[in-house]
Each structure stands twice: as C-alpha cells, then as structure tokens.
Image (cartoon, rainbow, N blue to C red):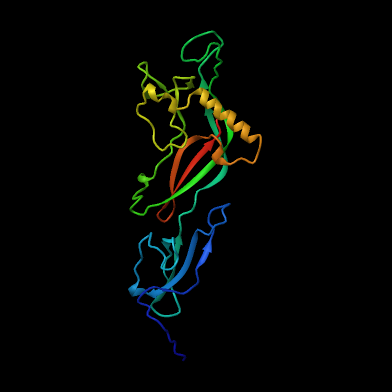
C-alpha cells in the first residue's frame, strides 16, 4: 500500500489555488471579487472576521468563507475565502412613475406669491419617465462607517412653502411660486433644513430656477453627447440601502430630469 507524504504545516490556513477574479456587477466589467481556496487541519480551523484584508491583495477584504469540505488527507479540510473590494460608483438606466410639482398662478392680473401679473400656473401631473439609478458603495470598517445608520441617505426632492412670518418650515406644498416657495432639499443634499429665513431665499431654487433647469437640460440634450454632471437632476425617491456583500453596503438613488 502506498504511503501518502504531506509537506507543510497545516495548523494554519494554506492557500491551495491561484486567485480567481470575477466581475459581479452587470454591465460593469471590473473584477471586484477574488476567490481563493485554502486548507487546514480541522482541529486548528477557526473562521476569520469579515473585513479581514487579503494577505497579498491590496484593498480586497474578506466577505465570506464557504463551508469546510474533506480532502483526500485525513483531518485536513478545504474551503474557499471570498474577498471583494469596494466598487466604484456606477449607473444603470431605469424608468419610474413620478408626480411633478405644480406651479402657482392663473391668467388674471394679480399680485402676490403667484408671480408677475398674468402668470400661468399648472397642476401637478404624473408621468413615467427615464431615470438614472446611481449605485454607491460603503464598507463598514468600524471607523468611517460603523453601522448602516452612518451612511448618508439622499432624500427625495420635496417642495415646501414658508409661513406667514416668512420663515421656512417643513410644510409640504403641491405648488411652487416665483419667489416665496422653495425646493427641498437642494439636489444631491443628504440633509434638509429646519428653518431658513428670508435672507437665504436665493440659496434655494424657486419656480424660475426650476424652469431654468428644464431649459438648460433641453439645450444640452439637443446637442449630444451630454455628461451626467452637466444636467440638472432631481431625486425621485429617497436612497435605498442594502447589504451588497459581506460588510459592504450599497446605496441606490434614483435621479430624473425635472419637467
């Protein structure tokens, strides 16, 4: 009967395969995941912590270890460690149903928050439109982000009106005027406002600014190509957070063009 000879100390985990890379995100041809097989004496095995960095691959952190499987050598088990690095921000196309803001105004000669005399208003309207899904990724490293609650959520575009005293409170409005109503929050903002005085009106877009966004987008789209950063977008729904892999959290934010 042949004698099996082993060479090495299997009291510690030993790699038994080359690293295998893969690109797990549809439409993004980047190798964000790396897998490698290891073996060790079962009596000496203990799982390592999620987030442990790979011994030789920079920026790749442990996401998962597979169950142990027996090898041909007694008491020596094998398994796979799955590592990943934090993906870069990427976008995917989509469509959403969105209710656009209405405008204060009528066809009469008036003064007040409706705007200049003879200003036409519009009711709110709902429409299915093209959208940009933006995906951002955050690793819960215990320093910058300790829990999912530490990751900023980008709020959906909201519309608020001032009180009679001229101080902005979070009073939801279905219409915006030329000078006294605001969009809340400003596009891309992770936080809102609890009170903004008259002196800060110019910092928050009104109907006239909203309409300038539409005009700017139409001009750009008429002469492609167009970069996303040059467009004026609004957030259709507040960001959604989920666990992408291991201790990496994915944030999805849906952006659309104002109409």
Residue in front for this viewpoint, 180 or 257: 180
Q: Where does the C terminus fall, quadrant-wise? A: top right
**Extreme-right residue of the structure:** 223
Q: Furthest-bottom residue in view? A: 1
Is 72 left or right of 95, judged from the image as shown?
A: left
Q: Position of residue 43 (x, y in %)?
A: 33, 74
Horizontal and vertical percent position of residue 138 = 42, 50
Number of labels in the image equals 0
Is 115 or 170 nearer to us in this picture? 115
Vertical arrangement, residue 181 with respect to residue 130, above or below:
above
Query: In the image, residue 44 lies at what x, y percent?
Result: 33, 74
2 vs 21: above or below:
below
Splitting the image into 4 quarters, where does residue 46 fall?
Answer: bottom left
Where residue 256 sits in the image (x, y, percent)?
54, 35
Residue furthest top in the image: 109
- Residue 189 placement: quadrant: top left
Q: Residue at x 45, y 65 (%)?
A: 57
Residue at 35% across, 29% down: 194
Q: Is the residue 245 above or below the residue 171 in the image?
A: below
Q: Residue at x 51, y 23 (%)?
A: 207
Residue drawn where x is 54% and y is 40% of the image:
229
- 27 relative position to 174: left or right: right
């Amino acid at each position: 009967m042949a004698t099996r000879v082993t060479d090495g100390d299997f009291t510690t985990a030993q790699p038994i395969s080359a690293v295998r890379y893969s690109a797990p995100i549809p439409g993004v041809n980047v190798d964000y995941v790396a897998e490698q097989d290891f073996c060790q004496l079962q009596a000496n095995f203990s799982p390592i912590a999620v987030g442990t960095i790979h011994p030789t691959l920079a920026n790749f952190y442990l996401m998962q270890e597979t169950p142990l499987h027996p090898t041909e050598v007694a008491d020596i088990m094998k398994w796979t460690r799955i590592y990943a690095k934090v993906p870069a921000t990427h976008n995917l196309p989509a469509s959403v149903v969105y209710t656009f803001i209405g405008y204060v105004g009528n066809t009469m000669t008036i003064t007040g928050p409706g705007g200049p005399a003879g200003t036409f208003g519009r009711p709110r309207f709902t429409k299915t439109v093209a959208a940009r899904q933006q995906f951002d990724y955050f690793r819960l490293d215990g320093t910058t982000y300790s829990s999912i609650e530490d990751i900023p959520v980008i709020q959906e575009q909201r519309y608020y009106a001032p009180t009679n005293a001229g101080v902005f409170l979070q009073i939801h409005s279905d219409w915006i005027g030329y000078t006294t109503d605001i969009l809340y929050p400003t596009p891309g903002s992770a936080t809102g406002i609890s009170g903004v005085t008259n002196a800060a009106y110019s910092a928050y877009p009104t109907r006239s600014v909203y309409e300038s966004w539409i005009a700017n987008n139409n001009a750009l789209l008429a002469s492609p190509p167009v970069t996303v950063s040059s467009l004026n977008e609004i957030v259709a729904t507040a960001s959604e957070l989920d666990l992408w892999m291991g201790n990496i959290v994915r944030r999805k934010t849906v952006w659309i063009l104002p109409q």
